[in-house]
Image: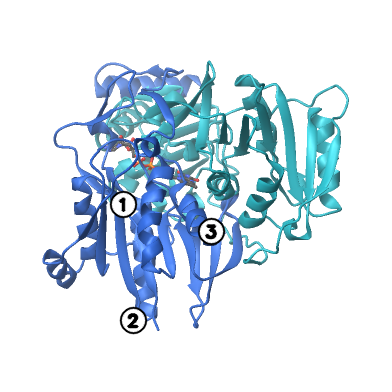
Chain colours: A blue, B cyan
Amino acid sequence: MGMNILVCVKQVPDSADTIELCEGSSRIIYKEGTVFRMNRYDEFALEEALLIKECFPGTIVDAVSVGPDRVSLSIRKALETGADQGIHLRVESDQYLTPFARASLIAGFARAGSYDLIMAGIMAEDDMECQVGQILAEMLCLPCATSVIFQEMSKDEKTVYVEREIEGGVHECITLPMPALLTIQSGINTPRYPSLSNVLRARSQKIEMIESQMAAALIMDRTVIGLGYPRQPSAGEYLEGTPAAKASALLKILHEAAIL
Amino acid sequence: MRRRFYIIALHAHGKILPETYELISFVRDIGGEEKTGIILGSKPGIVMMARELAQKTGMDIICATSKYLENYNAQGYKDALKGLIDCTDPCYICIPHTATGFDFGPLLGAALNIPCISAIEDVHDGVLIRSMFGGRIHARIKPPGPCAILTVQPGAWEGSAACSGPAGPVRIVHSDISPGKTIIHKLKVPASKDVGFADAEVIISAGRGIGSEQNLALIKRLAAMFQRSAIGATRAACDLGWLGYDHQIGVTGRTVSPRLYMACGISGAVQHISGMRNSRLIVAINTDPHAAIFRVASYCIVEDIKTFIPLVLEEYSRMSGISF
Ligand SMILES: Cc1cc2nc3c(=O)[nH]c(=O)nc-3n(C[C@H](O)[C@H](O)[C@H](O)COP(=O)(O)OP(=O)(O)OC[C@H]3O[C@@H](n4cnc5c(N)ncnc54)[C@H](O)[C@@H]3O)c2cc1C
């Protein structure tokens, strides 16, 4: 027994401070010294996969990521955290890929892998699209639940009960037949830190590298006309001066509004 | 040929959700004229809702019924819509970007082989605008082909006013879909504790930017300056275990509208903003001058909360003679 689980992990820049825009174009420039890390929602997905592995001996957890060379660091991080194998679907370009393009690449790989369960974060923190998991499920003809905040696998590994968090904190409860795909919402668990033994194991482990040739059409299946800072300026007033001056200005405003 | 706009209505507990009417305002702004509403469910309840929608909007409504659509399920929605919508003519399929809409929207896009553009917040001259990086950056997008799925951020548009003209026609069709593979159970409403939001005139909220649990003390001391105050949080601050989820404000948390909302170390992701944008006075403190929270703030303070809040406390003590 035991399952094969695939976790999709995306690498994102740690902070938006270190990205620069080429005004009017669709290029993002990562300034020198940009720190990249695993998308936080994917950390929750990976942790959930590792928790299932602990309950179902014999389970294998694979971590897959699409991207240029740098993303291998996040795959390595997944191995250090406890994933068994890492797969890098390498693309040359460091540019925006549509959810459809990402899902197509992962589907191409996952089709051959006979996974019982595929997990992904609900959303990537950089592009904020909430789509890759769902498109992947449709491509692989898997039932899918998004925004999962609780899951429980049946003992016979044939079904999975999940609670989806919807608006206002209400939970929608459903049972899916396996194989299935889940996108994980933050707060479902507390992601662990890598253990020393896993860090040592991961150090010598090879990441499977698959070169992905993407048709230009796949990359450009949507026209991003441009990226920019929001046009709508702040409606508010920026307080000026020294920090102390701003503090007194704030107190004065609150006093005048009869709040203090 | 004119492009058709399909407006997919969402409903819960026998009521049409307000996000449905927001889609109509969105379609108006993008210049869509040919509109068809689609509502899915099981008889008899869904037919009443379809009539209400036709009455309030004057639109043509397709009411798709099946016993397998009694409860929302992604597969049922996807299959029924796929059967109804013909993508040989130009069309945009508009869906609210709620936990329901983003559940089936991308599935439908993949099933129809058309792109899905999600979480649209604004429109300028027919160009769609959506947030990236927590709202710090906006992408301007024009769908490449004649057809696309567009999911629209809840709260980004006001709901359309009820139309005064005649009700639109309602066409009831039976959706010949198969029973889904999923079993649907009852909804659960997790018990929540009141953290004083209902009575609070002032809410001081903490985000990831407060840096550590220790710095919550600063937030609490700031809140203690006011008589009726409560502590709020972003989902990120709750995920870190700094505050319980009962404190979370936003789409998946509570919606508040106090007289004063102070956002401390909060980036202003749209999911947070939708829970607090109607506060009377909004003060934001953030080290990043480009933070999205400043776009909804009445007063913007570009400072580090670790050094700025102590200054406010100090100055207030000096003025009032009370120490905090
Ligand atoms: C389906 C879904 C539902 C969601 N529902 C909610 C919800 O209900 N509520 C919610 O809040 N979120 C929700 N989120 C998450 C949301 O997208 C954001 O990730 C979250 O709101 C970010 O929280 P934050 O602002 O605390 O953290 P970050 O985005 O990490 O922002 C931290 C901010 O602190 C600033 N900062 C850093 N250091 C300092 C300092 N020393 N002093 C001052 N400022 C500093 C930074 O400049 C930054 O702007 C949801 C997401 C999804 C996908």
- Is the shortest distance between ligand 1 and the CB of mark 1 under 8 Å? no
Q: Amino acid at mark 2?
A: Gly
Residue B166: x and y in percent read 88, 25
Q: CA distance from mark 2 to mark 3?
A: 25 Å
Q: CA distance from mark 2 to mark 1?
A: 38 Å
Q: Is residue B156 left or right of residue A102?
A: right
Quadrant in which residue B97 is drawn? top right
Q: Nearer the observer, disc 2 or disc 1?
A: 2
Can see residue B217? yes
Residue in front for this viewpoint, A20 or B252: A20
Which residue carries the number 3 mark? A145
Check disc 3 and report its element: helix, strand or loop. strand
Which residue carries the number 1 mark? B213
Residue A73: x and y in percent read 19, 53
Q: Amino acid at mark 1?
A: Glu
Residue in front for this viewpoint, B199 or A50: A50
Which residue carries the number 2 mark? A58
Q: Amino acid at mark 3?
A: Ala
Q: Residues within 10 Å of mark 3 (few under 14, many from 20)?
A: many
Rendered view: A156 above or below B320:
below
